[in-house]
């Protein structure tokens, strides 16, 4: 039996659009990090997205929603890469956006496999069961106002990241937004991998926009410095880590300091082939 997806009331829809939409005073930075302030705001105003998981996604899902509401008006075409259960995509559909999800639903990155279940539960979302790249044939070129991902790119092999961004460049509209929120291991096991992975993501984001690599590198270093000294930085909790650990013995999956990093780039066409 398929559970019923959440339905927003008209008042809830109006409140979200008024609080976080284009007329709000919020600004979307090209690079930022998750904070306790933002998490508490989400608990106050978006409880149905900020209390699902018990880990970083309770911060990240509402953050993605807020950013998209600010950047793109209802009616815009959006694509989510690797949504798993498409909680954010569903809320965006409730608010009048046209949303496509591309996800292989093969369990990779500890993701789900329930493709048919989600198709039935979320009929308003176009769900394509595939790996995101520029080779997808069911999508129109340069047709999306925003392409986004939540806790996905850190699971993509680094040598495959350029293919993901080839897809972003192929399917994103000129002046559209590439928005990605990633888990970043700041200290502990795999921290060196995550440092290189995030640096590559930010380089690829810079290539979409008018930023050069040196500016991207400066913003990266400055953001890491700020988040390590900011008392308001949101870190993965012990409870969240224990959820991630699952049945793996603690010695094989020890605690690490994990934060959430958000990158937003506006696509600027620079080459005729684009």
Image (spheres, helix red, strand yellow):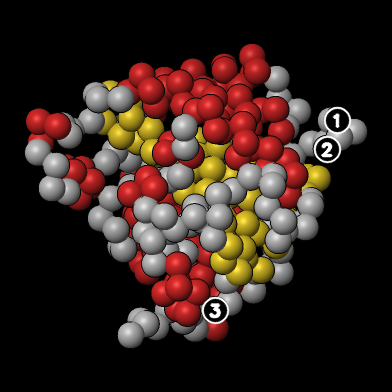
The answer to whether residue 218 is visible is yes
Residue 19 position by quadrant: bottom right
The residue where tag 3 is placed is 123
Side (left or right) of 199 relative to 73: left
Q: Name the image quarter holding the C terminus.
A: top right
Compared with 255, 26 (above or below) is below
The answer to whether residue 41 is visible is no
Residue 4 position by quadrant: bottom left
The residue where tag 2 is placed is 274
Residue 216 position by quadrant: top right
Counting residues from the N terminus, which is met first, the one under dot 2 or under dot 3?
A: 3
108 or 193, which is in the foreground? 108
Residue 157 image position (x, y, % from top left): 47, 32
Assess whether mark 2 and mark 1 are in contact (beta carbons under 8 angstroms).
yes
Distance Cα–Cα, label 2 vs label 3: 32 Å
Counting residues from the N terminus, which is met first, the one under dot 3 or under dot 1?
A: 3
Side (left or right) of 81 relative to 152: right
Q: Name the image quarter holding the N terminus.
A: bottom left
Could you classify mark 3 by the number of other residues whose Cα lies within 10 Å: few (under 14), some (14-19), or many (20 or more)?
Answer: few
Rendered image: mark on residue 271: 1
């Amino acid at each position: 039996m398929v559970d019923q997806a959440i339905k927003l009331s008209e008042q809830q829809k109006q409140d979200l659009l008024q609080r976080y939409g284009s007329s709000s005073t919020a600004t979307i930075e090209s690079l930022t990090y998750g904070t306790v302030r933002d998490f508490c705001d989400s608990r106050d105003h978006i409880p149905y997205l900020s209390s699902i998981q018990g880990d970083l996604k309770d911060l990240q899902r509402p953050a993605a929603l807020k950013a998209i509401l600010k950047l793109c008006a209802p009616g815009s075409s959006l694509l989510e890469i690797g949504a798993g259960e498409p909680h954010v995509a569903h809320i965006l559909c409730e608010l009048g956006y046209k949303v496509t999800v591309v996800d292989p639903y093969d369990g990779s990155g500890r993701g789900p496999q329930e493709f048919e279940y989600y198709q039935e539960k979320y009929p308003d979302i176009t769900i394509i069961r595939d790996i995101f790249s520029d080779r997808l044939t069911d999508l129109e070129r340069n047709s999306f106002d925003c392409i986004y991902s939540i806790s996905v790119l850190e699971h993509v092999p680094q040598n495959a990241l350029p293919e993901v961004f080839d897809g972003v460049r192929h399917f994103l509209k000129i002046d559209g937004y590439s928005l990605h929120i990633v888990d970043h291991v700041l200290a502990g096991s795999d921290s060196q991998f995550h440092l290189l992975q995030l640096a590559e993501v930010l380089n690829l984001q810079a290539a979409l926009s008018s930023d050069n690599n040196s500016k991207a590198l400066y913003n990266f270093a400055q953001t890491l410095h700020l988040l390590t000294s900011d008392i308001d930085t949101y870190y993965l909790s012990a409870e969240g880590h224990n959820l991630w650990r699952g049945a793996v013995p603690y010695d094989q999956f020890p605690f690490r300091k994990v934060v959430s990093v958000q990158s937003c780039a506006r696509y600027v066409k620079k080459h005729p082939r684009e």
